[in-house]
Amino acid sequence: MKLSFKNISLTFAAGSVGGLANMCAVWGFGAWGISQTLGVKLAPHLSVPWLYNRLVWGGLWGFIFLLPWKNLSLPARGLLFSLAPSLVQMLVVFPYQAHKGMLGLQLGYLTPALVLFFNAVWGLAAVFWLYLSGER
């Protein structure tokens, strides 16, 4: 994807759509007790600041789709690029900002798997938005 104002705004929007999908997945798993059933203490309350955080950070992570990896399909790029926010969450946010240990293991041993899943939701929702925009 070439660097233009249109593509920059498109990737931010795609990332924000992904952030909304991620937020719905994380909240839904918590509200329905799925996270707790898996032994993970990850059940955030739905709030405007939490939504805002997901939309903005999702949009900023969307800029990763500006990387020129045309040899990969959109779904493959979505899954591959979702690893970046997953690694930041598990190696920076959980241990240093949330004080939940490396990989967030203080929240439960399956936390890394859920983080990977929720960020895969982000990546796939973002590429779906890109696909709808005509990006192939």
Image (spheres, rainbow, N blue to C red):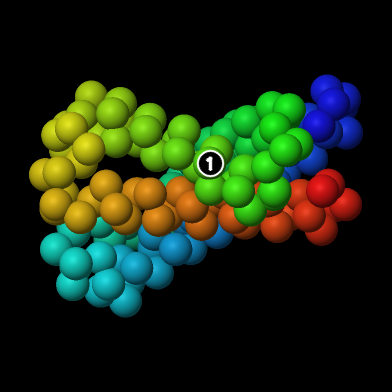
Camera-nearest residue between 132 and 75: 75
Residue at the (25%, 56%) spot, across then down: 42
Image position of 106 with respect to 21: above or below: above
| Badge 1 element | helix
Q: Percent from the top left, x then y, of residue 64?
A: 63, 31
Camera-nearest residue between 95 and 98: 95
Image position of 87 with respect to 74: above or below: above
Query: Where, quadrant-wise, is the N terminus in this rendering?
Result: top right
Residue at the (70%, 32%) spot, across then down: 69
Q: Percent from the top left, x then y, of residue 90?
A: 29, 36
Q: Residue furthest front?
A: 71
Residue at the (40%, 56%) spot, across then down: 117
Instruction: Locate residue 23 relative to residue 20 in the image: left or right.
Output: left
Q: Check disc 1 and report the residue beneath it.
A: 80
Instruction: Locate residue 17 relative to residue 44 in the image: left or right.
Output: right
Residue at the (83%, 23%) spot, across then down: 3
Residue 97 appears in the picture as rendered: no
Camera-nearest residue between 53 and 72: 72
Camera-nearest residue between 37 and 49: 37
- Looking at the image, how many numbered discs can be counted on the residues? 1
The image quarter in which residue 46 lies: bottom left
Query: Callout 1, which amino acid?
Result: Leu
Q: Percent from the top left, x then y, of residue 95?
A: 20, 29
Q: Percent from the top left, x then y, of residue 80?
A: 53, 41
